[in-house]
Amino acid sequence: MPSTHNKDKPWDTEDIDKWAEEEFKPEDLKAGEPFLEESSFATLFPKYREGYLQEIWGEVTRALDNKGIGCELNLVDGSMTVKTTNKTFDPAAILKARDLIKLLARSVPFQQAVKILQDDIACDVIKIGNFVSNKDRFVKRRQRLVGPNGNTLKALELLTKCYILVQGNTVAAMGGYKGLKEVRRVVEDCMKNVHPIYHIKELMIKRELAQKPELANEDWSRFLPQFKKRSVARRVPHKVKEKKNYTPFPPAQQPSKVDLQLESGEYFLGKKEKEKKALEEKREKREAVKEEKQKEREKDFIAPKEKEYKSSKDKEKKKKRKEKHENDEENPKKKSKKSKD
């Protein structure tokens, strides 16, 4: 039996946006009383963020006071705490405050992080450290996400309308829910060795298609590029083998381990003497390596060669000698007369 509830309502008009999020005001709290229980969230921050957080904590406190949220900065434990107070009127404000301190701990600047208190902005912290076990490969893929001079990251920010910050083993993103979904897909695929340029091309095409109202109810898959994975066989470098002169005689027999011990006299040593000799050899090798490392360390402390200091009088004397020498070369007749005299 068809449903009888899916009918057009007389009060529904086209100018109404059903997905718009209205701001929560103090008069919207119907109870009119503070919350029965206190809710609180805490997060740790690294040592290098301590100075910056001390500078901007006054602004953080003022921003949260507008929402009726209390905050505390503990420099001893290295933690930030937010909690509800008697003035809190918005039930979701404590969750926004939690996201704010989380972003501040992830090196997001305060001017950007404070935007999370708005209703239409959300955040997502994407963990990328577990995708690749090799450290060098991880650094290369993370740099690929940033791009040369940060161009790839700027393109993603423009297309997704999100703020993106790559920091350590995480990627912090702020923006709308639809943009955050695209950012997570691009970041995770980049760490799985899919270049971000493919997603950027796809997002650019989608943005152009969204501007055409005639394609609003059509499938866009025929317009999107299809990228196939290619397994290109890498050419192994050709090694040229040196030709050896043919000899009918077999190679000379190599001395065995016992023969070498007889030559060195180790064969006749006792068990304790052999152990003592092995320890001495290890010690000599250790000392040789230690000396080499010490020499490398001392290279940094070797003073560079400095130019010899010359006073102004020495410079004048040198200049006069040079001028005199040039004059003698220009007038060789005078010089010959002087030599005859």
Image: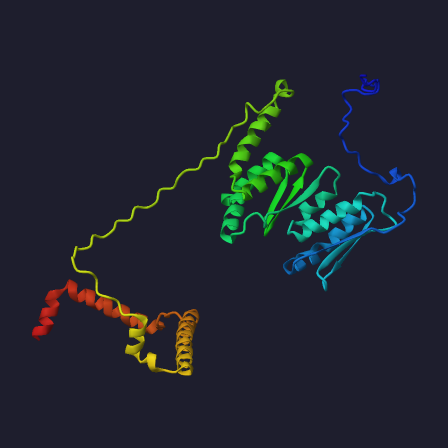
**Residue farthest left in this picture:** 340
Of residues 287 and 22, the one nearer the viewer is 287
State the image coordinates of residue 278 (x, y, percent, origin top left).
Answer: 40, 77
Residue at 16 percent of width and 57 percent of height? 248
Residue at 54 percent of width and 42 percent of height? 192
163 above or below 38? above
268 above or below 214? below
Colour scheme of the picture: rainbow
Of residues 121 and 340, the one nearer the viewer is 121
74 above or below 119? below
- Image quadrant assignment for residue 233: top left
> Which quarter of the figure is the C terminus placed in?
bottom left
State the image coordinates of residue 169 (x, y, percent, origin top left).
Answer: 59, 51
State the image coordinates of residue 318 (x, y, percent, origin top left).
Answer: 27, 70
Residue at 32 percent of width and 46 percent of height? 237
- The count of marks equals 0
Q: Is residue 14 left or right of residue 214?
A: right
> Which quarter of the figure is the N terminus placed in?
top right
Of residues 37 and 135, the one nearer the viewer is 135
State the image coordinates of residue 295 (x, y, percent, origin top left).
Answer: 40, 72
- Image quadrant assignment for residue 81: bottom right
Residue at 74 percent of width and 40 percent of height? 118
